[in-house]
Amino acid sequence: MFFAAALNRALVIPSSKVDYEFHRVLDIDHINKCLGRKVVVTFEEFAASRKNRPRIDKFLCYFSSPQPCFMDDERVKKLKSLGVSLPKLESAWTDDVKNPKQRTIQDVLSKFSTDDDVIAIGDVFFADVEREWVTQP
């Protein structure tokens, strides 16, 4: 959510067929209502808006090691079974998930800002970004 907000983008919640059932812990309607605009959408809404041809233009991984975005063959197959076309994975930095370097919001904006329509960002769970930015309400 932090990355989507910092990059001024809508957040697409991953499909529960591929990832965790985020709808169990996130009240998407409440988030959108509080912010007064649609900033979070389900994967199904995203796919429907693309005429069921969901495409990711750029896929950026926060970490490069031990494996960019933890994308194994099974996850790729699940995404492709949903009709998602995937580009080549790119890593923002050569960081190891076990030893993350602290980054600033400016670092994040410089590495993840793009004119591409749809971007995916992976591995941010272990990211070490300025605490005063990440812990904002």
Image (cartoon, helix red, strand yellow):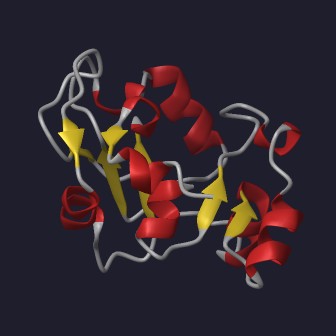
User: Which residue is most to the left?
Assistant: 94
* Quadrant in the picture for the C terminus: bottom right
Residue 85 in sight here: no
- Image height of 68 relative to 65, above or below: below
Residue sitting at 28 percent across and 15 percent down?
98
Place of residue 95 in the rendered image (x, y in percent of width and height, measured from the top left): 17, 29
Residue sitting at 73 percent across and 65 percent down?
41
Q: Quadrant of residue 43?
A: bottom right
Q: Quadrant of residue 69?
A: top left
Q: Quadrant of residue 18?
A: top right
Q: Nearer the viewer, residue 39 or 119?
A: 39
Place of residue 102 in the rendered image (x, y in percent of width and height, measured from the top left): 22, 37
Position of residue 6 in the picture relative to residue 10 (left or right): left
User: Which residue is most to the bottom?
Assistant: 36
Residue 35 in sight here: yes
- Image height of 9 relative to 102, above or below: below
Position of residue 47 in the picture relative to residue 29 (left or right): left
Place of residue 123 in the rendered image (x, y in percent of width and height, measured from the top left): 40, 35
* Quadrant in the picture for the N terminus: bottom right
Place of residue 32 in the rendered image (x, y in percent of width and height, measured from the top left): 78, 72
- Image height of 94 relative to 130, above or below: above
Residue sitting at 23 percent across and 53 percent down?
104
Number of numbered discs: 0
Residue sitting at 38 percent across and 65 percent down?
57
Position of residue 127 in the picture relative to residue 101 (left or right): right
Q: Nearer the viewer, residue 43 or 6?
A: 6
